[in-house]
Image (spheres, rainbow, N blue to C red):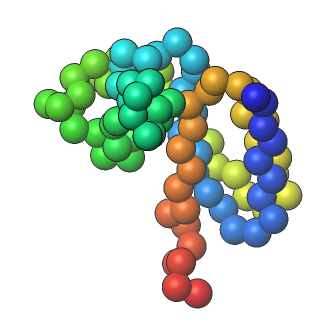
Amino acid sequence: TDNLYVMAWGRKRVILGEPGQLEALYRYPNAHPLVGSSQVNISSPDLKRHPKFARARLREAVVGVGDVLYLPAWWWHQFEQPFEDAGN
């Protein structure tokens, strides 16, 4: 389903991948508990283990306070919080 991601505070980096990239993103198989997720650490991919990931078509954005990100159904996404110290 489609989703809206609303930022109330802080900033996050989001990596987005359009649908149709099952091979390049190494989707976990249907019987796996993480089905639908990528086997690749998108932040630090191991191209020796996942060579097809080099062909993945990804976009990057930063969302901040008051931003709303529309996530269409079936889009790959990964959120990271590299900007703020989690200990504060």
Residue 71 higher or lower than 64, as above or below: above
Q: Nearer the viewer, residue 71 or 11?
A: 71
In the image, farthest residue toward the left = 48
78 or 59, nearer to the observer? 78
* Drawn side of residue 73 relative to residue 84, left or right: right
Q: Is 37 on the left-hand or right-hand side of 84?
A: left
Q: Which residue is drawn at the image coordinates 53% and 44% (left, top)?
A: 78
Up-down relation of residue 40 to residue 21 (above or below): below
Residue found 57% across the figure and 73% down from its top = 84
What residue is drawn where x is 69% and y is 68%?
10
Q: Is any part of residue 5 visible from this angle?
A: yes
Give how far across and how far down residue 80 sits, in percent.
Answer: 53, 55
Residue 17 placement: quadrant = top right
Looking at the figure, which quarter contains the N terminus? top right
Residue 86: where, in percent of width, then height?
53, 78
Say if residue 38 shows up in the picture: no
